[in-house]
Each structure stands twice: as C-alpha cells, then as structure tokens.
Amino acid sequence: MALTRDHAGRPVVAVTGMGVVTSLGQGKAENWRRLTAGESGIHRITRFPTDGLRTTIAGTVDGLFDRPFAAPELSERLAELAADEAVAQSGIGRPGDFPGQLFMAVPPVEMEWPQKQVLAEATNADVTYGTLLKAASAHTHAEWHRLFLFANVADRIADRFGTRGSPISLSTACSSGATAIQMGVEAIRRGESAAALCIGTDGSVHAEALIRFSLLSALSTRNEVPEAAARPFAKTRDGFVMGEGAGALVLEDYDHAVARGATILGILAGCGEKGDGFHRTRSSPDGKPATLAMQGALDDAGLAPEAIAYVNAHGTSTPENDKMEAMSCTAVFGERIAQLPVSSNKSMVGHTLTAAGAVEAVFSLLTMLNGRIPPTINYHDPDPLIPLDVVPNVARDADVPAVLSNSFGFGGQNTCLVLKRELA
Amino acid sequence: MRSMPETFAVSRLSSPVSGCCRAWARGAAPHLAAVRAGTAPIIDHERFAPYPVHPLGAVDFDRQIPKKSDQRQMEPWQRIGVYAAVWRSIRPASRTGRTSRTGFRSSSPRWWRAGSSGRWRGADGLKSAANPGAFLNERLMGDLRPTLFLAQLSNLLAGNISIVHGVTGPSRTFMGEEQAGVDAVRIAQARIAAGQADMILVGGSYNAERQDMLLLFELGDALREAPFRPVFDRADDPGLITGSMGAFSGARIGGSCRGARCDGYRQHRSCRGRPRAPRRCWRDHAGTLDTVAGYRCGRHGRVRRHRGRTGDRRRSAGAVRRVPADRAWRSCRSRVEAAFPMAVGLAAALVQAGDADAALATGVGHWRGEGAVRLSRA
C-alpha cells in the first residue's frame, strides 16, 4: 500500500479531534454558535477586586471551581476539558492510553498572593521572603511545591490521558499555542509517533498578571462597555483584552487515521516561524519577520498564496500589531489582500495568550468544515491605514479550502499555520 | 564501527560550551581545567543561610551584552543565559542571514517575581490593610517596574538572545525544571537528524541566588541546609544545593567542524518522588546507562561520566555506579533547567579536547525526569 506523503515526501498530518473552551463557553458547539453570531465573551472582572486598576475587564472562564483556586489549577482544568473533547472525538487509543506524545503550551506559573498570605500568617508577620521561607520550613504545604513547578500541569495532563514519552511544557509567548501544534506536526513527520496531543491553555487572569500587562500599556482601558473593547483593525483600537481558555488538537499520521476509520477533520499542512530581534514587545516596523513566517508556512505547505481563502489573524486590537499584520499580509498576498477575508477571533474571546494559537486553530478548522467565516466585531470605524476585508461584524458564508492562521508574540516569536480542509 | 541503531543521530555538537558561566569561571577552557584538576566547588553558606548555594560570582556582562539598556531590561537569569549564548563558531554574517532552518531552544527557568528587583520590597502593611485586595492592587501598580514582566517571561531569554546576539532564527522555550533541559537537547538533536533544522543553539540558564526559588524548593523539603558535600555523601541531610549557571552549545549537521558527535539519547520520565518510584526508575536508569555506555565502551575503553544533578541520592547512586568508567566527574549541584545542557556541553568539550574518546552526560531530576546522552569524537 502506498504511503500518503506531502509535497516534500513527509508524512501527512491529519486532525482527527479538536476541543475548545473559552469565555464564550465550553465545547465546539457552543463556541461556534456564539462566535458566528458575533457575540462577545468579555465582561467585567468579578474574580478579584479591581479597585485602582486601569483595566477591569477580561474574558475569564468562570464557574469551574467552587473554591478559591490558583492559576495553574484553572489552566489544567481548561486543558483537561479541551483535551477530553478532542480525544473523545478522535476515538484514538483507549481512555488513559493515548498513543502519542503531549505538547502543551502553558503559561508560566508562580506562587500567588493567597499562598503567601497563608505562609505569612503562620509566622504572624508581614509578607517578606524571609518570613515565607521560615514558614515553609515547617513543610506543611508540600502540595504547593508541586503546584508551582513549571512542569506540573503538563505532567498531570500526561497522567490523565496516558500520553507517551516526556510531556513538553513550552512557551513562545503569544504564539505558544501554535508552537505546540507545530511541535506535534514535526514529531509526526519525524516518524516518532503516529499521533500527538497538542494543547494550548491559559487560565491566568489574576490581579498581578493583569497589572503586568497594564503596566506595559498593552491592555484596552475601555471598561465602560466590556463587549466593545476588543476592536481589531478599527481606528479606535487601544489594546488587547486578556482572555482565558484552551484549545486541543489530536494530530495523527494520515494513513494511521484512515486505517482505523477515523474521520479526518482537516490537514495540518504547514508551519512557519521566524524570530524578530528588533524589540522585546514591538515588532520590526517593516513587518518582515511576520511576512517571512507567513511565507514560510505557505512554503512548508507547498501552497501558493492564492490557495488561501481566509486568514485567521493574530489581530490583538493593539495599535501596533494590527498595523504590522496588515502590512505583512499585504506583502504576502499583494493586491489580492483587498478581497481576502481576514478576521480576528480575539474581537470576541479576547487574547487567550498561551492558548490563542491552539484556540484559533480549532476555530480555523471549524471555519473550513462549516463554510462560514466568523466576523471581526466592534468594527465601526475603519482604520484608513488598514485596507483589509475584516469580515466586519457579521459572519459570512464562504467556501474555505485552506486557512492561514497567525500568531505573533512578545520576544519576537512569530508562528503561522496553514490548515487545509482536505488532502488534495 | 559505524553500526549504530537507527535512532542515533549524526549530528555533531560543534563549539561545545561556547559560552558558559559558573561559579568558577567563564568560558569552556577554565571549566575544562577545573574538571581536570578536580577543583573544589565554590559555595556560599552565608547569603541565603541556612541554605548553601553555588554563586555565580562576578561576571563582566559588558563583554557579551554591550548595551546597558539591554542589561537593564533583563533579570539576572536572563543576563546569565544571554552571556552564555555566544556562538563563536558562527560568523556574524551568517547568524542573521539564516532562514527558518536555524533555530534555537532554551530551557528556561522559573518565571517568578524577583525579590531583588528594583522597587519591590514586600507588601508591608498587607496584613493590616482594611481592603487587602485594593491595597495589593495599589502596591503592585505603583511598585512594579513596567518592564519587569519582560524580565520574568520565560521565553524572553530566547527573545533577549535574539536581540543582543542577532540570532533571529525561531526559538522554542521549554519550561519544566530539569526535564526541560533534557528535552531541549533531545529535540534539538532529533530535528537536526531529521533534517528539520541545520543549526540549533541549545542551552539554559538558572539563577539560584534568589529567595523565591529557594522558597519553592523548601516547600517541598528539597533543600539541603547542612554544609556542602558531594551528592552521593548527603545522608546526613539529603537535598539540593542549587547553583547559578548558564550554558549553551551549538549543534549542527555534518560539516567539517571539530567537535563531539552525539551518538545516542535515552530519556525516561518516570521518577516522580513517589515511594515506589525511586527503585523502579533506578532500575530503568541503570538499564539506560548500561545500554548507552556499554556501546563502544569496550572498544575505546574510556568513558567519562558527567552527572547532571540529583538531589536524591537513592535514585541515582546505584545506577551510576554500575557504569564502568575510567573517571566520573560529578557535578554535585542543582542547576535545574540549565543542568543537562551544561552536562552535555561539558562532556562534548572534554571529548573535543581529547580527554576522552567518549563521554556520557547524565541527568536526574529532583522530582522527575532522567536523561543520558552519549558523545564520541567526531
């Protein structure tokens, strides 16, 4: 039997399962319904006091715990929900026995203020590292050591799903979710395993994380009408809105999937990546790294720009990213860019940070399967410098055989994915 | 002679330990000299008492990070890593000219608010504040230096390397304590062997001289408080002594570079500190080492072992002792994410310098993760 190979002679990577959780809801059905209806998941933050904060809105995922929780616990729960949905859909392996590796994009973790306060209270002193260390030496909170290790979330997910080998916890800032998928693609192409579970998760909207972004002036401060704050590509955009969520994909060698009768949901055709040495948060003004990442993804997929019917933008709603992204898209697609739909899911779910690349890959696949492009909402004042068809405000039916999905992160990490509906 | 199992690599570690800073020295040569002489490790028992640490000592960061503005935007762990990530084997012109087939990956240490950062001193008054939430918000908004976040983000080690050294191939950052270092080396090797990349700069950094990191380990009762002793002699008070370090190596395919060849790789995830687990992973790890070290050992007769690190003597001692070797140099300090890249780099340097025909670099995590890499003369 002939092996199915791509244009470069490599195994073809199919998607056989996907799962998603965002502020719009749990699961593909609810997310897709609300996404295509143009609804927003952004709301006023109720999780912690927002007195004195410049930004008081986010796309948090609430209601998963009936007790106080730390960010890694939420990140793990979100990942678990998304992965459950993906693995169940794929039907691969057996429960607790996934025949492949785990690649997880996780947010960095650290001990949070509630734990510090508990420790400080034990010594009846204020919160300084001296008192915390003294309290810790009583060794009454061993579970916090485990909880705040970087590797913990992926380790627990690996246990839960029974993945093989060493679970990878990775970060490339805002492109992490896409990088997790890329690593799965590469592992399957190398023949290391027939399948990979790729997850991006982020449940880290707590006060300090919000403040950190706020101090970098990266967040929107349009708190009055939360649903209207995220407005990618619009003239009055003023920053991104933090979001939480998780996206999971089951990637599988195409022949392996066909042999066991799995439903092929799409093809992960290509990945491109490029670093940017310009600045720690700002992209190179000429947009060259982003352009190269996009072209790299197309080359890796063996496709010309004309094959792409829709761009799932990074579209954070920051003044800089949207302008740079538009410029890079123009460089790649030329004059055709004026008619090529480019929309941003972040207008509705916010910027899900470490999860974004994975969440948006799921939305890209749903776009192709359903033949419907989600809109960029809150687009009422076009930016004359950004002449894109952003699919404004209302979803649009379209035949979409291939999607380019962009993710650009702090520290100059640019990762782009090309997804196809079918093999040919 | 060349009949290697198909999983082994043909990649080579060129210019190993091209940059490296540690308590003793900066650069590969001083480290080799220290290893050969069996120099005693440098310990600081005072600054973080009761926890001993291996301090980095004074490093002239200006040499590798010329712009002060760049240095200011980084926390010490990033400065250490950027200093170490100098890739002398690559001419400056070809560094930036690379396309997507150059990459680098770093195993990045914890993302943590640094207690030593400029303006944050502690939340005095938090206990007595009428509205603790609002109080905290106010303190954080006012006290945190805006760019501190960037100095903490795990992937910004890679980002800073890009900016300072002009290495603009893509990067991946792995988080996950010791295992991340093992995975970074493993996947770099796998990608090069499969032709998915031409050149990869792989390494890690860790700053041990911070109370917040010690706090994390102390919560798990993982630290040693008694004075320094080699890892296998810590029965009086088992535990880690952490140390600051940075190490990067360049890996590339083929070519006419002088370097060490990475022959094989084994990795195991099992050991996670559960009561039954140590014996099982000890057995598994012993199996690992015998397999890798046994290959070619008889032919060349000289295998040098480098311990990555371990805090749990029970797990590793028996396994390591069963490997026949002329000399075993044990790095008795915990460098967490930087540990395995350092062991690999040092092993490669020793092979390249002719001290050994083959070397085994091993690593064992304090909580989970074991790895071993065998290197031989290229």
Image: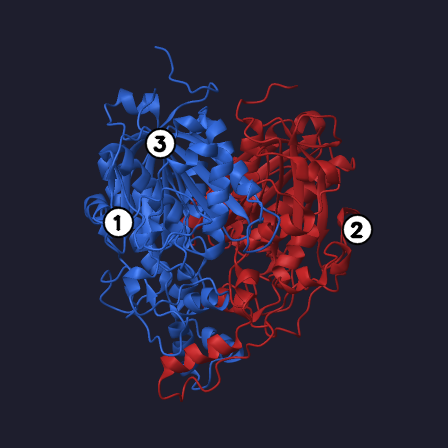
Comparing A323 with A192, the one in front is A323
Q: Which chain is red?
A: B
Front position among marks 2 and 1? 1
- Element under disc 3: loop
Q: Chain of mark 2?
A: B
> Which quadrant does the N terminus of chain B fall into?
top right
In the rendered picture, chain A carries what hue? Answer: blue
Q: Report the residue marked by disc 3.
A: A309
Q: 10 Å neighbourhood of mark 1: few (<14), some, or many (≥20)?
A: some
Front position among marks 3 and 2? 3
Q: Position of residue B140 (x, y in %)?
A: 47, 75
- Element under disc 1: helix
What's the CA distance linking mark 3 and mark 1? 30 Å
Q: Position of residue B185 (x, y in %)?
A: 57, 40
What's the CA distance linking mark 2 and mark 1? 51 Å
Q: Earlier in the sequence, mark 3 or mark 1?
A: 1
Q: 10 Å neighbourhood of mark 2: few (<14), some, or many (≥20)?
A: some
> Which quadrant does the C terminus of chain B fall into?
top right
Q: Report the residue marked by disc 2.
A: B30
Q: 10 Å neighbourhood of mark 3: few (<14), some, or many (≥20)?
A: some
